[in-house]
Image (cartoon, rainbow, N blue to C red):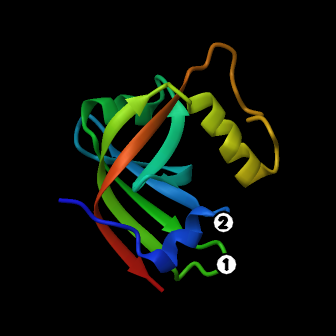
């Protein structure tokens, strides 16, 4: 099953709209964190660091959900359910710099930790709910 983002909601990925990213903990309970979101080639992309809770979660269970809320109108949002179909470190550092430019206006991601390995999760959309 696949879904797509309605064209009139693609602007959310150009704005500084944060996503609430939900993964599943080992006991099945949800774990939600704010993330920067990107949309490439029909997939939602989320960038993180290897070893974080969300990284451990998606490697164990690829089912995720994301709510992307319009910063200009919080009643306009996307609700997305899908599966991480690719996990890669390739291009992840360049991608987090791109996201830092979008969200912070900075050319380089300023919060990198020594030895940190960035990772990209490419999420295949299974269900999209648009509201507002």
Pointers 2 and 1 in contact (C-beta within 8 Å): yes
Answer left or right for 86 relative to 94.
Answer: left
Check the picture and name the quadrant holding the N terminus. bottom left
Answer left or right for 126 relative to 48.
Answer: left
Kindly indicate the quadrant of the structure image that contains residue 15.
bottom right
Quick one: 2 or 78, which is closer to the camera? Answer: 2
Name the residue carrying label 1. 72
Crowdedness near tag 2: few (<14), some (14–19) or many (≥20) residues, C-alpha within 10 Å: some
- Of labels 2 and 1, earlier in sequence is 2
Answer left or right for 8 relative to 102.
Answer: left
How many marks do you count on the picture? Answer: 2
What is the x, y in percent for residue 45?
47, 47
What is the x, y in percent for residue 132?
48, 86
Asked if residue 104 is positioned above or below residue 6 in the image, the reply reads: above
Name the residue carrying label 2. 15
What is the x, y in percent for residue 90?
51, 25
Kindly indicate the quadrant of the structure image that contains residue 69.
bottom right
């Amino acid at each position: 099953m696949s879904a797509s983002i309605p064209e009139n909601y693609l602007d959310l990925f150009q704005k500084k709209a944060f996503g609430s990213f939900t993964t599943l903990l080992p006991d099945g309970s949800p774990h939600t964190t704010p993330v920067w979101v990107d949309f490439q080639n029909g997939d939602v992309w989320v960038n993180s660091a290897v070893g974080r809770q969300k990284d451990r979660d998606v490697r164990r269970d690829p089912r995720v959900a994301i709510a992307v809320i319009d910063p200009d109108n919080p009643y306009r949002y996307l609700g997305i359910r899908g599966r991480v179909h690719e996990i890669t470190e390739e291009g992840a550092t360049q991608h987090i710099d791109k996201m830092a430019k979008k969200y912070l206006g900075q050319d380089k991601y300023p919060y990198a930790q020594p030895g940190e390995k960035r990772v990209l999760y490419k999420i295949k959309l299974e269900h999209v709910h648009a509201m507002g």
